[in-house]
C-alpha cells in the first residue's frame, strides 16, 4: 500500500515537471494612488535544447508594434540560470536556460498613449490601462511560446478590490488561440449576466449610451437565442463588451471585433442599440458560417469564398432575426431593399468572382460586392429550391445538412454539389453565371412571397437643393441654397431655420416636401417644393404589400417557415 502511494506520488511529480504542454498565465491588475498596473506572468517548461523562443504582441487589427506596451520584462527559473537574449526583432525574445527548466516570464503592460479612446485616433484595439478601468484584447497583450506544440492554457485573473471584471478567459477550456482571441475588461464596467441553460451570457458596458444596460443585455440574449434556435445549438457562454469612444459632436462611429465566444464593441454614445445588434447578429452567425459548415477557402484565395461566408451570413442574419421575432418583417425588407439598391448601384456588380480576390483588399466596392451579391444569391437559391420542390424544401434544409455533416472541402467550393445532394435541385448553372461569372441577379418577382413583388422602380431623383447645419439650440439652419436647384424658386434662403416638416420626407422625390421655416426676421412661413432635378432613376425594390406583414405570410417567408396565414 505504501509503495503504491509513493509510486503514485512520484508519477505525479514526474508528470508535473515533464508536462511541457502546459502554459500557466496570471493577469494581475492592481491599483495604487490613482494609477493602474497590469502585470502578466507566464510559467512554462523551457525547450529541451535549452533555448525557448517567445513571441510578444506584434501587429494585429491594423495596430502596429504592439510590443511597445510591453515593459519590465523579467525571466526567472528555479535554478537561476536563465538569460534573455535580445534579438534584432522587437517582437521576439529568446530565453536560454538549462534544458527543460521551469521558467517564469513576467512583464507589465504600459500603453504608450493614455486617456479615453478617441474615434478619430483609430487606435482603440490597443490595450487600455486607465486609472479606473482596463480593456485588453488577447492579441495585444499576451506573450506566447514560438512553438507549434498544442498547449493547454490556464489563466488566473485578478482585479483590484471593488472593480468589476469580465473576460471570456473565464469561459471554459483554453488554448493559445482562445488566449489570443480574448477580451478582458475591468474597473467601472457594469456587468449584466444571464444564465441560459447554465451558460453565462454577459454584457459589460462602460459609459452612457443611447440604450440602457438592461435593454442591451436582453437584446444580446435574444440575438444569441435566435441563432442558437436557427442552428439547433445548445446555449454557449458569451461575452459582449461595450467601450465608449469620444468623438466630435454629431459624429457617430461603431465598430468591433469578433473574438469567437465574445464580441468587443467600440462605439460613440449616440449609436442606437439596433446598429450594434445588427453587427452582433451577423458576427454571431459566423460562429456557424463558415466554420461549422465546412470552413472557408484558406490562403490568399479566401475572398473567393466571401459570397458564401459574408453574403450567406447576411442572409441568415435577417432570417434568424425575423424568425425569433427580433426584427419585424419591415426591418428585414428594409435590409433587403438596401442590399438590392447597393448591388444595383455597385460599379463592380458584374465583376467575376476571381476579381474579388485581389480587389477585396484595395477597393471598397469590391470589399462590399460579396456581401450584397452573396445575400441576393442566397435568396435566389432559397427561392429556386422552394419553387422546384413545391415548397417542401428550402435553403434551411441545406444548412441543416451541412451542420450535421460538414463537408471536408471548403464550404463555398462544394455548396452547389451539396444543394443537389440534399434537394435534388441543380443550381450549377445559377452558380456559374451569378457567382463565378458575375452576371447580375434579377430576383424573380415572387421571391419574397406575400411581402410584395420585386419590382424595378422608376422614380424622380431626390435633390434637397440646400444645405445647412444645426445651430447651438440644435435647430437646423439653412446656410446655402443652390440657385439652380428646386429649393430656390420656392423661397428658401440662407439664414432661415427649419422648424418642422409638414409633408414629404428626405429622399422621397415622388411627393412635395412642405417645410415650416422661420425667417431671420422672425416670420414663420410654410414653403412647398418638389425636391428633384427632374431626372428619373430606376432600381430594383421589394414593393411592400399592404396589410399586416406579420400575419399575411410575409414574416413566415422571410423566416423560412411554412407560410400559414394567421389572418
Ligand atoms: Zn462577416
Image: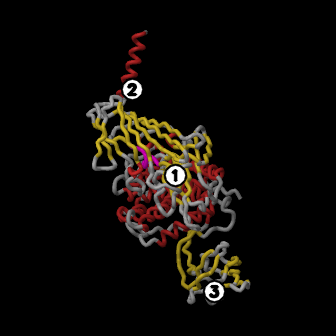
Q: Is 407 above or below relative to 198?
A: below
Rendered location of residue 437, percent (x, y): 38, 66
**How far is disc 2 from disc 1 in space, using C-alphas?**
36 Å
Q: Give the color scheme: rainbow, by chain, secondary structure or one colour.
A: secondary structure
Which one is earlier in the sequence, the residue at label 3 or at label 2? 2
Q: Which numbered dot is residue 493?
A: 3
Which one is earlier in the sequence, the residue at label 1 or at label 3? 1
Rendered location of residue 394, percent (x, y): 52, 54
Which one is earlier in the sequence, the residue at label 2 or at label 1? 2
**How far is disc 1 from disc 3 in space, using C-alphas?**
46 Å
Query: Does the magenta segment cover residue 138?
Result: yes
Looking at the image, which residue is at 67% across and 68% down? 546
**Along the viewing direction, whichever of 184 and 423 lies nearer the viewer:** 184
Q: Is residue 92 visible?
A: yes
**Along the viewing direction, whichever of 469 and 240 lies nearer the viewer:** 469
Kindly indicate the quadrant of the structure image that contains residue 485: bottom right
Kindly indicate the quadrant of the structure image that contains residue 308: bottom left
Give the magenta part as a residue range.
137-143
Q: In the picture provided, is 339 more to the left or to the right than 367?
A: right
Using a 10 Å C-alpha cutoff, classify the residue at mark 2 as few (fewer than 14 neighbours), some (14 to 19) or many (20 or more). few
**How far is disc 3 from disc 2 in space, using C-alphas?**
81 Å
Judged from the image, the secondary structure of the residue bearing numbered disc 1 is strand
Number of numbered tags placed on the structure image: 3
Where does label 1 land, which residue?
A: 264
Kindly indicate the quadrant of the structure image that contains residue 154: top left
Rendered location of residue 333, percent (x, y): 59, 64
Looking at the image, which residue is at 44% across and 65% down? 369
Amino acid at each position: 500500500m505504501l509503495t503504491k502511494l509513493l509510486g503514485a506520488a512520484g508519477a505525479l511529480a514526474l508528470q508535473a515537471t515533464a508536462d511541457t504542454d502546459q502554459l500557466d498565465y496570471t493577469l494581475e491588475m492592481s491599483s495604487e494612488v490613482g494609477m493602474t498596473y497590469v502585470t502578466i506572468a507566464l510559467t512554462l517548461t523551457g525547450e529541451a535544447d535549452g533555448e525557448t523562443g517567445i513571441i510578444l504582441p506584434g501587429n494585429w487589427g491594423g495596430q502596429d508594434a504592439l510590443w511597445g506596451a510591453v515593459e519590465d520584462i523579467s525571466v526567472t527559473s528555479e535554478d537561476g540560470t536563465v538569460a534573455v537574449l535580445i534579438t534584432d526583432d522587437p517582437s521576439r525574445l529568446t530565453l536560454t536556460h538549462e534544458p527543460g527548466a521551469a521558467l517564469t516570464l513576467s512583464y507589465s503592460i504600459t500603453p504608450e498613449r493614455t486617456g479615453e479612446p478617441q474615434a478619430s485616433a483609430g487606435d482603440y484595439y490597443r490595450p487600455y490601462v486607465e486609472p479606473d478601468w482596463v480593456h485588453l484584447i488577447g492579441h495585444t497583450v499576451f506573450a506566447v511560446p514560438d512553438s507549434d506544440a498544442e498547449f493547454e492554457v490556464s489563466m488566473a485573473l485578478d482585479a483590484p478590490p471593488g472593480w468589476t471584471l469580465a473576460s471570456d478567459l473565464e469561459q471554459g477550456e483554453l488554448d493559445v488561440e482562445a488566449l489570443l482571441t480574448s477580451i478582458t475588461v475591468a474597473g467601472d464596467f457594469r456587468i449584466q449576466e444571464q444564465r441560459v441553460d447554465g451558460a453565462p451570457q454577459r454584457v459589460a458596458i462602460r459609459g452612457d449610451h443611447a440604450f440602457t444596460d438592461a435593454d442591451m443585455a436582453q437584446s444580446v440574449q435574444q440575438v444569441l437565442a435566435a441563432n442558437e434556435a436557427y442552428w439547433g445549438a445548445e446555449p454557449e457562454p458569451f461575452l459582449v463588451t461595450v467601450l465608449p469612444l469620444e468623438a466630435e459632436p454629431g459624429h457617430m462611429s461603431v465598430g468591433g471585433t469578433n473574438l469567437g465566444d465574445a464580441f468587443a464593441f467600440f462605439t460613440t454614445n449616440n449609436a442606437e442599440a439596433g446598429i450594434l445588434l445588427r453587427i452582433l447578429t451577423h458576427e454571431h452567425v459566423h460562429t456557424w458560417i463558415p466554420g461549422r459548415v465546412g470552413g472557408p477557402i484558406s490562403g490568399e484565395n479566401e475572398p473567393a469564398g466571401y459570397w458564401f461566408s459574408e453574403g450567406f451570413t447576411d442572409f441568415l442574419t435577417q432570417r434568424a432575426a425575423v424568425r425569433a421575432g427580433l426584427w419585424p418583417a419591415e426591418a428585414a425588407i428594409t435590409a433587403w431593399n438596401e442590399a438590392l439598391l447597393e448591388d444595383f448601384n455597385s460599379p463592380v456588380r458584374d465583376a467575376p468572382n476571381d476579381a474579388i480576390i485581389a480587389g477585396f483588399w484595395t477597393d471598397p466596392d469590391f470589399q462590399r460586392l460579396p456581401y450584397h451579391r452573396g445575400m441576393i444569391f442566397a435568396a435566389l437559391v432559397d427561392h429556386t429550391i422552394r419553387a422546384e420542390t413545391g415548397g417542401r424544401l428550402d435553403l434551411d434544409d441545406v444548412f441543416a445538412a451541412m451542420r450535421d455533416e460538414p463537408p471536408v472541402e471548403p464550404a463555398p467550393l462544394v455548396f452547389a454539389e451539396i444543394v443537389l445532394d440534399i434537394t435534388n435541385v441543380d443550381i450549377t448553372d445559377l452558380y456559374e453565371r451569378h457567382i463565378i461569372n458575375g452576371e447580375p441577379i434579377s430576383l424573380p418577382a415572387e421571391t419574397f412571397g406575400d411581402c410584395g413583388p420585386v419590382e424595378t422602380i422608376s422614380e424622380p431623383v431626390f435633390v434637397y437643393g440646400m444645405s445647412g447645419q444645426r445651430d447651438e439650440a440644435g435647430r437646423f439652419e439653412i446656410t446655402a441654397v443652390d440657385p439652380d436647384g428646386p429649393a430656390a424658386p420656392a423661397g428658401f434662403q440662407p439664414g432661415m431655420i427649419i422648424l418642422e416638416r409638414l409633408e414629404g420626407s428626405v429622399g422621397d422625390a415622388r411627393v412635395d416636401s412642405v417645410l415650416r421655416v422661420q425667417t431671420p426676421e422672425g416670420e414663420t412661413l410654410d414653403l412647398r417644393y418638389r425636391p428633384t432635378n427632374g431626372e428619373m432613376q430606376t432600381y430594383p425594390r421589394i414593393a411592400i404589400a399592404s396589410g399586416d406583414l406579420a400575419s399575411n405570410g410575409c414574416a413566415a417567408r422571410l423566416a423560412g417557415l411554412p407560410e400559414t396565414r394567421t389572418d
